[in-house]
Image (cartoon, coloured by chain):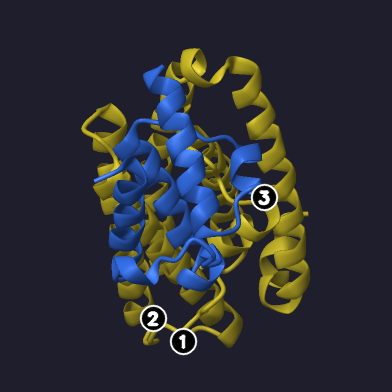
């Protein structure tokens, strides 16, 4: 399983969706019913994959694919 | 008996405490084992208890809680933007907790506050002081990881949002909060 798959699976698990329903194009705000859930997701990803986001990162993310890219790029940067 | 404004205010407090408990409960479940996880778990339990205190207080005053959909916390996120990491969550929480202390102090010092409300506020304030203390210590300990300047800027951003939210909330509920504000001019 690739890192992208693992991140997608984590997103699906936190938001309580089937992993197949988490398409790259899916807008994050359409997947959650409150902003608190989004905060929880963002923290969960940072804890799980040992990465850190800042305000600029989050402002640049609107869909699932972008969020996965962010985690993968940070995780790779940490590994290097 | 209490009037409908006080009924609404106490229900609003209760609803905000429930939102806080649910939020911190989810975070406490998410975080890795650490002193922050331990303190956040205690804060989650405190917030849940405060919701119970307000529910019991309303019952002693012969009232059932009103269903309040809009809480102070949801307004914060809308005004300040979504926190992007744990430091920002603690920063926004610190600003929020100070606002809670200030609001409860204002309420306790208002005229004709029922004894049931005074007792509830007094009980809650003990916990609120600890919330402010543990978060301040946690933020101090995060200076190496997030940068002192960054933490300070984040706090300022949330303080500004707090002022805006407080202003708009008091404007929106002027009549309900009027008695409290008039007493503390």
Nearest the camera: A41 or B54? A41
Q: Does the residue at mark 1 contact the one at mark 2 (Cβ under 8 Å)?
A: yes
Q: Locate the C terminus of chain B by quadrant.
A: bottom right
**Residue B180 rendering spot, x and y as whole percentages:** 66, 65
Rendering coords of residue B159 (x, y %): 69, 40
Q: Chain of mark 3?
A: B
User: Which quadrant of the figure has residue B178?
Assistant: bottom right
Q: Residues within 10 Å of mark 2 (few under 14, many from 20)?
A: some
Among all residues in the image, which is located at the extreme left? B33
Label annotation for residue B175: none
Q: Residue at x 59, y 45 (%)?
A: A58
Specify whether disc 2 shares its chain with disc 3. yes
Q: Is residue A72 left or right of residue A14?
A: right
* Nearest to the observer: residue B44 or residue B11: B44
User: What residue occupies the far front of the structure in this picture?
Assistant: A1
Instruction: Give the number of the mark in front: 2 or 3.
Output: 3
Q: Chain of mark 1?
A: B
> Which comes before the other along the chain, label 1 or label 2?
1
Q: Are marks 1 and 3 on the same chain?
A: yes
Q: Secondary structure at mark 3?
A: helix
Residue B13, position as x, y percentages in the image:
48, 66
| Separation of marks 1 and 3 at Cα, in angstroms | 38 Å
* Colour in which the image shows chain B: yellow
Per the model, the C-alpha gap separating discs 1 and 2 is 6 Å
Q: Residue at x 51, y 80 (%)?
A: B68
Residue under label 3: B80
In the rendered view, tell whether residue A34 sits above or below residue B78: below
Which residue position is annotated with label 2?
A: B61
* Mark 2–mark 3 CB contact (< 8 Å): no
Sequence-wise, the earlier of marks 2 and 3 is 2
Assess disc 3: are there few (<14), some (14-19) or many (≥20) residues with their C-alpha within 10 Å of its C-alpha. some
Q: Colour of chain A?
A: blue
């Amino acid at each position: 399983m690739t890192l992208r798959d693992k991140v997608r699976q984590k997103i699906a698990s936190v938001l309580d969706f089937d992993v197949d329903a988490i398409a790259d194009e899916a807008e994050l705000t359409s997947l959650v019913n409150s902003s608190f859930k989004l905060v929880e997701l963002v923290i969960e990803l940072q804890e799980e994959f040992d990465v850190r986001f800042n305000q600029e990162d989050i402002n640049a993310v609107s869909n699932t694919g972008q969020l996965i890219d962010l985690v993968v790029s940070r995780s790779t940067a940490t590994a290097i | 008996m209490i009037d409908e404004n006080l009924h609404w205010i106490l229900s609003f407090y209760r609803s905000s405490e429930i939102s806080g408990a649910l939020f911190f409960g989810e975070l406490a479940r998410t975080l890795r084992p650490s002193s922050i996880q331990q303190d956040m778990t205690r804060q989650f339990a405190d917030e849940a208890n405060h919701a119970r205190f307000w529910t019991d207080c309303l019952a002693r005053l012969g009232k059932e809680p009103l269903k309040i959909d809009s809480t102070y916390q949801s307004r914060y996120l809308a005004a300040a933007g979504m926190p992007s990491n744990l430091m920002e969550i603690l920063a926004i929480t610190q600003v929020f907790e100070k606002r809670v202390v200030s609001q409860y102090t204002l309420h306790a010092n208002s005229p004709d506050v029922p004894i049931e409300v005074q007792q509830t506020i007094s009980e809650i304030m003990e916990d609120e002081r600890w919330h402010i203390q543990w978060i301040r210590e946690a933020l101090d300990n995060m200076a190496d990881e997030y940068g002192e300047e960054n933490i300070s800027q984040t706090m300022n951003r949330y303080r500004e949002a707090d002022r805006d939210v407080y202003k708009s909330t008091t404007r929106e509920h002027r009549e309900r909060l009027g008695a409290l504000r008039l007493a503390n001019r």
